[in-house]
């Protein structure tokens, strides 16, 4: 039998005392690390902070007025007015949202003219119409309607004469309204229209 050139090292020989010492040291390390780690449930509770307005004590914002609960200055006879489109935004800079609604009388056929109305809340919180941006008497229809950055914009469709079929308006103009000096100022591009919005 041939012996290796390097004699066997003493610590490579496994003895029972070595196994017991290793096991005891490992148990001490595991126990110490468990003792020193923070409790995960306690840490999560400590880090939790209120993020909602209600939790922070701030009042929730008042929702925009609902046009379904408003009486519009629109004479529809025996039929009901229909809210065709609606959009909300803070138009007068008071921090509360107004609602702008495009409304017409319900019709079985044809294209009834639209009215555009601004709705706000009274001091008692009841929705009410405060301005008419487009009167149905103007005999126009509204498309591409939006409320953005405190302004109202729309495309107004109208007719050049009574000979033009009521289904197919042949005049288009872009209109916009912005609150200024206590009233809605109207700007029109394209076909000329009345320049002021009536308040009610």
Image (spheres, grey):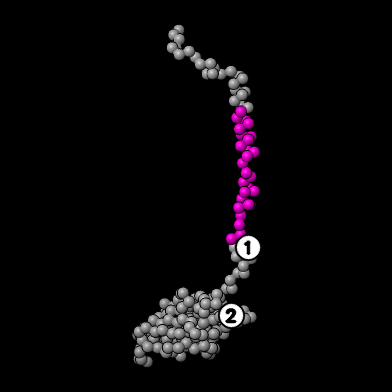
User: Which type of secondary structure does the marked residue at label 1 adopt?
Assistant: loop
The residue most toward the top is: 1
The count of marks equals 2
* Location of residue 67 by image quarter: bottom right
Say whether residue 115 is visible.
no
Instruction: Answer with left or right where residue 172 lies relative to residue 18.
Output: left
For discs 2 and 1, the disc positioned in front in the rendered view: 1
Q: Neighbour class for label 1 at 10 Å: few (<14), some, many (≥20)?
A: few
Give me the disc on residue 23. Answer: none
The single residue placed furthest to the bottom in the displayed view is 162
* N-terminal-most mark, 2 or 1: 1
Query: Residue 198: where, in percent of width, then height?
Result: 49, 89
Q: Which residue is mark 2?
A: 121
- For the point 64% across and 38% down, which residue is it? 35
Identify the residue shown where x is 51% and y is 82%: 118
Residue at the spot 52% in from the left edge and 77% down from the top edge:
93
Q: Label the magenta part by its dominant secondary structure.
A: helix
**Which one is nearer the viewer's eye here, 94 or 69?**
94
Q: Secondary structure at mark 2?
A: strand
Q: Are marks 2 and 1 in contact (CB under 8 Å)?
A: no
In the image, residue 107 sits, relative to residue 53, either above or below, namely below
- Distance in Å between CA atoms under marks 2 and 1: 26 Å
Magenta span: 25-51
Q: Position of residue 61 (x, y in %)?
A: 58, 71
Whether 195 is among the magenta residues is: no
Residue at x 60%, y 22% (from the top left corner): 19
Q: Which residue occupies the foreground of this view, 187 or 168? A: 187
Q: Which residue is mark 1?
A: 55
Quadrant of the rendered structure where residue 38 is?
top right
């Amino acid at each position: 039998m041939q012996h290796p050139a390097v004699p066997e090292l003493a610590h490579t020989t496994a003895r029972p005392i070595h196994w017991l010492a290793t096991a005891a040291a490992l148990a001490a390390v595991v126990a110490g690390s468990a003792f020193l780690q923070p409790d995960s449930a306690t840490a999560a509770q400590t880090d939790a902070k209120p993020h909602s307005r209600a939790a922070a004590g701030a009042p929730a914002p008042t929702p925009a007025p609902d046009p379904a609960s408003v009486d519009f200055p629109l004479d529809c006879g025996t039929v009901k007015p229909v809210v065709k489109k609606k959009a909300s935004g803070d138009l007068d800079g008071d921090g509360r949202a107004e609602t702008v609604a495009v409304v017409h009388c319900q019709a079985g056929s044809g294209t009834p003219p639209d009215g555009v109305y601004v709705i706000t809340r009274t001091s008692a919180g009841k929705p009410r119409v405060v301005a008419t941006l487009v009167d149905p008497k103007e005999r126009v229809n509204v498309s591409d309607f939006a409320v953005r950055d405190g302004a109202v914009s729309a495309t107004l469709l109208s007719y050049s004469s009574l000979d033009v079929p009521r289904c197919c308006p042949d005049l288009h103009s872009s209109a916009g309204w912005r609150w200024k000096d206590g009233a809605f100022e109207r700007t029109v591009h394209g076909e000329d229209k009345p320049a002021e919005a009536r308040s009610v």
